Image (cartoon, rainbow, N blue to C red):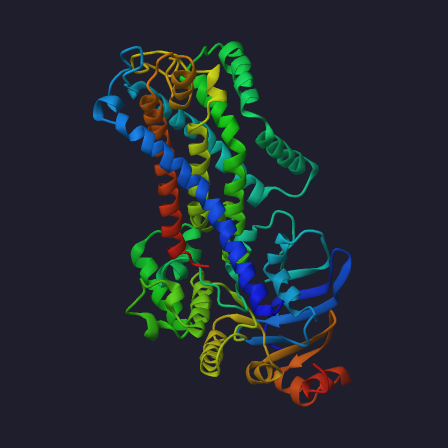
Amino acid sequence: MNRSVVQTLGFLLLGFVALVVVAPILLVVGTIVARGISAINWQFISSMPHGGMREGGILPAIIGTLLLTLGTALVAVPIGIGGAIYLSEYARDTGLTRAIRLAIVNLAGIPSIVYGLFGLGMFVLFFRFGTSILAGSLTLAIMTLPVIISTAEEALRAVPQEFRTVSASLGGSRWQAVRNIVLPQALPGIITGVILGLLRAAGETAPILFTVAAFYLPRLPRSPLDQTMALPYHLYVISTQVPGMPLSVQYGTALVLLALVLSLNVVATVIRSHFRRQRQW
Amino acid sequence: MDSMVPKIRIQGVSYWYSGKPSLEGVTMEIPDKAITVLFGPAGGGKTTMMRLINRLNDMVDDTHMTGSILLDGEDIYAPGTDVSRLRRRVGMVFALPLPLPGTIRDNVLYGPRLAGARDSARLSEVVERSLQQAALWNEVKDRLDAPAISLSGGQQQRLCIARSLSLEPEVLLLDEPTSGLDPISTAKVEESLFELRERYAVVIVPHSVQQAARVADYAAFFLSGEMVERGNGPQVFTSPRDKRTEDYVTGRFG
């Protein structure tokens, strides 16, 4: 076979593979939209569940998911970014540092249902928070921590070493270099990582199963110690636990969850490309 | 030259990176208000020597040093030395122009702001004075708020010089400051060096023997970590005492 034939075949094969990668997301979004769009109206989204949840009303689930995501962010973001700064800018290569990295890698590998049971034992029972937004957020936060730490650390390390050297040569301390130059330059990458980590947390079912999620709670939560409904769990419930649930309601709920997650994704992409244009290296 | 009080005294300095020797028993003086040139082939230890003077090599792990370096008679490696203050007194300009993110003004004021300077009137004075001393003021005075990376390579390098000068250091270390620059920018940088030597102790690693000969008041030849010879600029280049110096200066190796 001559070279140009081989090259054309190669391009065709790679193009085909790229299409194969894109196809599932189009199929998923397409199916959910097609089957769920009919259920979407203002009442569906903004009211409490009614008609035995068969007529929609997913407001408490939406609010619950948003609150859980906020709670996760409040815990995981400061700890995660702080940890990343320590590992990237201060830690030397000692046994302790290697142990910390090993711990983070292992944390990332724990199955989400195990996190759910951990959250039950630790926060719901031992700390006596009960099934609550607090317990759910803490559980989700620990689950999200490895993602935030690794993407933030990578973003920090990507900032060229020369900036730190120049700052030092002008009499700057290590923290001054981090605060004035390294952190601002790494911020787009950090923000992207944070958003992606949070949107994963927003869509998880297993960790919230035993720690916060309510089967049927037709009111908005009153405090962090309150239970709440949440979209992923609600979707599971109406798809399996409620007989006679119209398909359009199930797909409609899935569509709302998908829209929430995808819009966060779009925000992350916009932030990333905006800052990439402004980057100085 | 002999009547000048040495600004920096380097005494018996030897230095190792991870066990490999980089400098061997260097003893020399750097006089104030003059240009001292450290020259020699690559790997000779000149850059290492400079980075020891502002303790920038503190950032490197697994190194070992013997000997001492005195600034105005004080050992800069004494325990408890304020390294940030040392680096404000001994400024450094690197081989590649390295503008920090931000505007021209931000770059010049980075050092003073780190040290806590806040008075905006004073800061404006600092910006003008530093850019004048770096021979850049006329070219940028109307666009101080433009991003630093919008300048040409030669202008960026002079900006880096202005940035170091804004701290009013006593010594200025320049490591091959013109190696990436075109001849006109190189000439402008060299011209600014002659003005700087009226005020500061200037130490420069030149990027060519010709540049060394053009600017040196005082020169030291480094070969494989050893300081082979030092003396008055013209003397070292036209009638060197050591054969190795003569071979390098005349281009027999390098």
- Residue B2 lies, with reference to residue A165, above or below; the image says below
Q: Name the residue rendered at 32%, 28% in the picture.
A: A36
Position of B240 with respect to A171 (left or right) is right
The residue positioned farthest toward the left in the image shown: A42
- Residue B34 lies, with reference to residue A256, above or below; the image says below
Counting labels gives: 0
Query: In the rendered image, which quarter contains the N terminus of chain A?
Result: bottom right
User: Is residue A176 among what the camera can see?
Assistant: no
| A180, A127: nearer the viewer | A127
Task: Please identify the quarter of the rendering in which residue B107 is found.
Answer: bottom left
Position of B4 with respect to A220 (left or right) is right
Q: Name the residue rendered at 63%, 34% in the picture.
A: A100
- Residue A137 screen position, x and y as percent: 44, 22
User: Is residue A115 among what the camera can see?
Assistant: yes
- Residue B110 lies, with reference to residue B37, above or below; the image says above
- Residue A133 screen position, x and y as percent: 41, 18
| B42, A87: nearer the viewer | A87
